[in-house]
Amino acid sequence: MSFDHQKIEPKWQKHWEKENLYRGINFSEKKKQYILIEFPYPSGERLHVGHGRSYCCLDAVARLRRMQGYNVLFPIGWDAFGLPAENYAIKTGIHPSITTKENITNSKKQAQSWGLSFDWEREINTTDPDYYKWTQWLFLQLYKKDLAYKKEIPVNWCPKDKTNLADEEVVAGKCERCGTPVERRMQSQWLLKITAYADRLIEDLKSVDYREDISAQQINWIGRSAGAQIKFKILDHKSEITVFTTRPDTFYGATFLVLSPEKARDYLDFVAGNKRPEVADYIEKALNKSELQRQEELKEKTGISMGFFAQNPLTGEKLPVWVADFVLSGYGTGAIMAVPAHDQRDFDFAKKYNLPLKEVVKNEKESMFPKEAFEGEGTLVNSGQFDGLQKEEAIDKITQFLEKKKMGERAVDYKLRDWVFSRQHYWGEPIPIIFCRNCWEEKSEKQKKEAREGYDFSKIDGKEHAVVTVSEEDLPVALPFVENYKPTEIGASPLAEIKKWVEVRCPICDSQARRETDTMPNWAGSSWYFLRYLDPKNDKQFADRKKLDYWLPVDWYNGGMEHTTLHLLYSRFWYKVLADLKLVPGVEPYAKRTSHGVVLGPDGQKMSKSRENVINPDEVVAEFGADTFRLYEAFMGPFEQTIAWDPKGVLGVRRFLDRVWKAHQTVSSQKSVVSSQEIQRSLHRLIKKVEEDTLHLKFNTAIAEMMKFVNQLAIGNYQLAIEDWKVFLQVLAPYAPHLAEELWHGLGERDSVHRQPWPKYDPKLIVEESVTIVVQVNGKMRGKLELPAGTREAAVTELAAGLDSVKSHFYGKRVAKTVFIPDNLINFVIL
RNA sequence: GCUGGGGUGGUGGAAUGGUAUACACGAAGGACUUAAGAUCCUUUGGGGAUAAAACCUCGUGCGAGUUCGACUCUCGCCCCCAGCACCA
């Protein structure tokens, strides 16, 4: 006996839509609950079972919360700008605006077929001009706060996608999307000063409930290290070299300095005077290496002496200056003081090139020096007046001393780089900036100097232009419709070729000016979308402040681990900027963040077309129904764990739903008025378990408990009142909304099961009347006793000691101690 | 190397100090059926013991420790997964 999901599921989906069951109500008296899933990218691949896992499980949470009386907001939208959409358009030869629209229509149909309780009235789309108008507006706020600047920098260039990539989008030297090795290029780019918020992005994690590894990964990525910058004078040269170190305590152990190839370039003239052409050769070769090459050559450090010396500002020692490719230009100052005795990399380099070592930290027990560098803690030696100090104190004292002598200062550095924000692509939000030559020329020399120093200008055809913002009333800067949206070979945006669009009047001086032709990365629209849900149709503001105050922060945000150092970090950054502008409440957007595990193919491999192991959710829904799909997504394993899709497991949950259907037929025909005690107890335990497990991400065990309950019925010979069966249907409703609704109405109910309050369990019924007491001897189970709850120790001891299986262990021994846990266990310790 | 998570039956997993293996899959046997499928029932960690049971014993990556009692806590080690990685 089975039910026809193809008949009942669409029926209820239509019904719910008509009834508008799942709206989040602004300013409702009820307690609010904002539950958010990462909005999907409407690609040609449609939604997959990975989306299903996140959406179906969080949908169960949203439904449960509604039944608990919360005013739930569970919205969805489309993150539709970006490279995949553009690549898909290029592949199919259809304009991205058309494919995007089609993909949204299809993905929406899918989401609806899963019976998800989204508030569709708040649906948004990042490519909608009414939406990206505000993305552009927000960019202007960042610009006005000096958090956006344009600078010529080396960028990660993907030769296949013909675009630059943020560091976060480069994985192991390759393009995150297409796997092509990334090249280095100098290019003028918009950057957002996320580094200015680095400390707060770390610090404020303390105030939110993120899963341990998510916070850890963000902190890791930001990579804060505290130390000092120290100046070394170059001998026979007027300049000095500033190095960054986290170990000022090893300062006396520095035996040479090393510059990054980029930094060394500044001294080429000086080196040429010393007649060392091989230095220039080395630098040039090092600079031409791609990121990937540099990474592959990791193990073997190379370098060459620059042929000049610097002076230790405290001891006056002459330190040779080298250039080496293991020193990174992008971190610290691009120059280091090498302390080979206490840094393994410096040690390896010193050994290879026969440079001197000087031990300044001693630890008799741990140090393996001079076999290898000693990086641990110990007592300072060979360090003048600082001898005898321990690490922390030494760092403090030496830094203070350097500061006093004006030879150094405390400094903090981060691995995090400013966010490269421009892309040379068509399918993105145009950056609302205009470059004006006339405005530049009208600047005073002082203003020009300031603009140059603040990277607040752009060079076009070799001439400097002033940066002028598009006025707010002219937003949005609409993305023009073009025939040719393919990226250009030279890496300029296709927009640059649309003369009519590029050439504009300057909003300040009205002279001929040029638009910025770069567009924003797809991380722009997603950095604030959760705010727009709160007021999606507002054409005066990005969102009304009162609505923001009512709904924020997001109570529960679930999404993929792959966004931890991208979207999640970016959107926290934007939110903090908005908080500083007093446009949003609080300082953190998401109170709680969780992450679902990846769904692998049935073969345990990552799903991919080439492996032919892709599970199409549409087929699962068609064959077994949305409820089965939802239930399996939740039941397949622990929510946060990577797990392989098991087609047999899908059958298993469908069997469970069939048993529910069958039980319903029996219950409704029996028409019992009272349930047996045993069934009542199970039911109340079930309410408690499902409620708790669902809110703690333990969807799999919540379902296991429901299965147990129904299995109990299947054994037969039970008595279950219709009213209690209705309670079960309410418990089932968040997970299998269609079947629950169908059966609920089958019992004559008129209103939706999803509008019912969550059943309250009776604590008295949770407690067992009779309990199983485990009898142990020396901690090993030797017997069980079925006794009324609350039986006292004396009685239990007597009964337990009387058991044959227990007595036999007492022979020749004596009971030294008895451990009694009421209603649970008794343990005889015998000697 | 650093950071975080993990290691339990044939498989996915359950149990966060108290009966190890809930729930599901698979497998074996049985009922129904001309048959297959579906469905239902029974069994299902290893070893020993028994006519059958009761029962005994080993068992949660490895080794130690704490405890009346450890999958769970502590220490050391091995392995797997994820992220970062010449970050000074």
Image: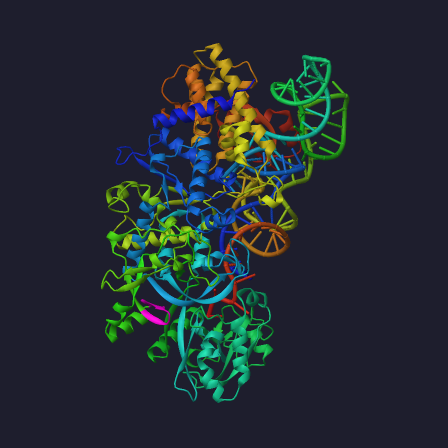
Q: Which residues are magenta?
A: A455-464
Q: Can residue A460 be found in the magenta stretch?
A: yes
Left or right: A813 in relation to A329 = right
- Pinpoint residue A92: horizontal percent, then vertical percent: 51, 46
Q: Residue at x 51, y 80 (%)?
A: A322
> Is A164 rendered above or below residue A46?
below
In the depicted view, which residue is nearer to us: A206 or A731? Answer: A731
Q: Please, what is the dominant secondary structure of the magenta stretch?
A: strand
On-image quarter of the N terminus of chain A:
top right
> Is A73 rendered above or below residue A567?
above
User: Can residue A767 be seen in this snapshot?
Assistant: no
- Pinpoint residue A582: horizontal percent, then vertical percent: 25, 52
Q: Can residue A667 be found in the magenta stretch?
A: no
Q: Quadrant of residue A498?
A: bottom left
User: Can residue A154 be seen in this snapshot?
Assistant: yes
In the depicted view, which residue is nearer to us: A487 or A581? Answer: A487
On-image quarter of the C terminus of chain A:
top right
- Pinpoint residue A37: horizontal percent, then vertical percent: 41, 41
Q: How many marks?
A: 0
